[in-house]
Amino acid sequence: MVHPKAAKKGWKAHHSVWLMLFIAWTMCYLDRAITGPVISWMIANDLELIRGAYEPHAVGGLIGSMFFAGYMLTQFPAGFLGDRFGRRTMLVISTIWAGVATILSGVSRGLNAFVAARVLTGLGEGAYYSNDRALVAQVTPAEKVGTGMGVVFVGLAFGLTSATVFSPWLIETAEGFMGQAAWSFPFLLFGPPTVVVGLFMHRLLPGGAVETYRGALPRLIAYSLLFLLVIMGIFHLSLSLRLGVLWQTMFVLMVAFVLVGLISSRIGPSGATVLRDRSLLLMYLSAIPILFTLWFFGFWALLVVSESSDLGLSGAALYAGLFGLANAIGYPLGGVVCDRIPGIAGRKRLYALVCVTVAVLVALMVPSIQAEDLTAMAILLFLIGMVFAAMQTVHMTLTADLSPPDQLGRSFGMWNLVAEFGALLSPVICGYLRDATGSWDAAIVLTSALLLASAALVVLVPRAVRY
């Protein structure tokens, strides 16, 4: 006879799901995060794609933001499709799509083709988050949901760290046989394994009552083609009118606002909660600074360190990678702590405390950069990465607490759609501020201020009961 306590230990079915999703997050984040180091290399080497740009950091940031333009626009539709056609179905489609589009990014030549490939990558990866978060909450025991959210997200940290640390070295190695096209090597290297991971997900992830690629894939393609045409149309229009990168970003934001408005007007009564509930709306808005912070460091940390030292890109990568490395500790740590503080009120206070701590640590980056103190920068990047990741896990767990169980896909889809306003703005706004001021100080102060606003918004969340 097995002792009751012993029965609780050991490998469970939900652990297998966590592991598979962890691997997929690693590959998808590799595909996503290599854009930052590639753009940094292009800027440092005055590559033809951005040669002669008056604001090279802003233009580079705009290229990164185009990924997030695609990524954010498929968030809610993908969550809806996952609720209807199955979580596994959407996760498999998203992962394979991301791998194929990453390969296309590597074989593209010219700015328009590269931007289109990055937008396509974002459109595909946009189907992942909402269904991943919903599947974790669905298969994990209630008392372990926070831990599951954090453990799976360690894959994000692994992918981000690997992209930051290894991409400059891979590009420099590829220069010997690819010349100026060496920037494409990381895309060509990481795309195919992502496709393989997607095929394994089809075999190993549990299916729901309804799982149908025939129903989900055509609809996702239709949404994605529409969004691709809109985004690239805005991109070409702004270039032909010689508008600045900030105007281009504003146009994409307008499209996102229109999408949210259309969703709000067309959604039926059964889905109204995820859009009209005050608590969830505050959670969505408070997530914008989270993604803004993640992609300030995820996109620009390499150049922040490189331009504040004489290390070069490869040497700076080891320091910049500390942010992602610390994420691997912070995501599960935040989940474990969150699971030990049950109740919405307690988790609200926990989030506010941790968020304010991150804001202070980010602000301390300014004097360390001004002093060109590499030791201080390294310590701060590690501490920010760890505490920030814990903070993000708490926020996601709190969002799950506040969401109707049968609408988790839609809820997390809307969470990420709104949050991605931060990811869309961060690379281009921070790059613009760097060009305008000649330093990263203004971008860092802005990031810190936004985090304080996030803490305040979560404190205002009113509900203290679960569904």
Image (cartoon, helix red, strand yellow):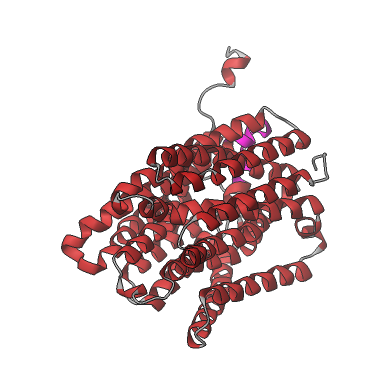
Q: Residue furthest front?
A: 371
- Quadrant the C terminus occupies: top right
| Front-lying residue, 6 or 293 | 293
For residue 29, above or below residue 216: above
Q: Residue at x 82, y 39 (%)?
A: 464
In which quarter of the view is residue 353 placed? Answer: top right
Decide: is 258 above or below 177.
Answer: below
Q: Nearer the viewer, residue 65 or 80?
A: 65
In the depicted view, which residue is nearer to us: 391 or 203?
391
Provide residue 220's location: percent of width, then percent of height: 56, 67
Residue 109 vertical placement versus 453 (above, below): below
- The image shows residue 209, relative to residue 44, as above or below, that is above
Secondary structure mainly formed by the magenta segment: helix
Q: Identify the residue shown where x is 56% and y is 46%.
A: 363
Residue 346: image location, x then y, percent: 75, 33
Q: Can residue 146 be found in the magenta stretch?
A: yes
Magenta part of the chain: 135-147
Residue 29 in the figure: left or right of residue 227: left
State the image coordinates of residue 358 (x, y, percent, origin top left): 59, 41
The percent position of residue 52, horizontal first and vertical second, equals 35, 77
Residue at (69%, 73%) from the top-left corner? 258
Residue furthest bottom as drawn: 240
381 part of magenta stretch: no
Asked if residue 209 shows in the view, the reply is no
